[in-house]
Amino acid sequence: MIFGLFKKKRVPQAAALIQLSGADAEMARVAKAAVDAYDEYLERNPIGFEIRDVAMLPGPKNALVNALRIELMFERDDRVRQFLTEIGLKLAHFREGIGEKEISPTGLPIDQLSSSNLADDNLVDTILAAESHPDRSRHAELMPAVRAEWHELAELFDKSIAIAKAMSA
């Protein structure tokens, strides 16, 4: 469980919720549940540089961004903040209109380019075929928007962390 490593570490955060009003505490609990669902999704469906449809997410993308921001505002552990930021930035790889099949930067799923899955004589042919795969150019077209959103998300998450640090000072 790569992403689940921090779940136990994040549980004590509930103590911070006691200081919140009923409605605020409920909002924080809902945010935590949304982040946990997203974390579990990433455990089952790891993502690197692929681009996926937002419909694959366990909830609306904007709601997940907001849930991560709430979690970051209440988190005190820098390692957990780093983890939450890392998984949050992966949301930039989720775009509208992609469809059920993710778009790989190579044009093919990475397991199809692995020498362990292909005979040596087929590996070169597969790699050369991937060069002209239509997904490869589509991925290249989408990456500027992914990078721009990644930077926007990084700024939002940094602001949430700054609020957390100010609250704990």
Image (cartoon, rainbow, N blue to C red):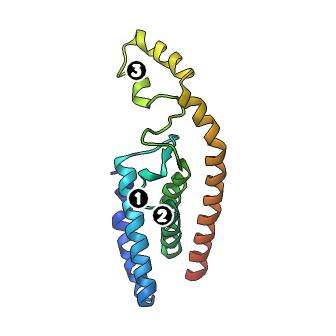
- x and y, in percent, of residue 125 in the image: 47, 13
Percent from the top left, x then y, of residue 85? Answer: 53, 60
3D distance between C-alphas at marks 3 and 1: 32 Å
| Element class at badge 1 | helix
Does the CB distance between marks 2 and 1 fall below 8 Å?
yes
Mark 3: few, some, or many residues within 10 Å (few <14, many ≥20)? few
In the image, which disc is placed on residue 38?
A: 1
Quarter occupied by residue 8: bottom left
Could you tell me residue 64's position as x and y percent? 48, 63
> Which of these two is toward me, 167 or 40?
40
Q: Is residue 137 left or right of residue 118?
A: right
Front residue of this view, candidates 137 and 66: 137
Mark 1 nearby-residue class (10 Å; few <14, some 14–19, many ≥20): many
Q: What amino acid does circle 1 point to?
A: Tyr
* 91 to the left or right of 3: right
Outermost residue toward the top? 121
- Numbered circle sitting on residue 64: 2
The mark closer to the camera, 3 or 2, is 2
Q: Does residue 169 appear anywhere in the picture?
A: no
* Chain-order first, disc 3 or disc 2: 2
Residue at 43% in and 38% down: 101
Q: Which residue is mark 3?
A: 115
Identified by mark 3, the residue type is Ser
Q: Earlier in the sequence, mark 3 or mark 1?
A: 1
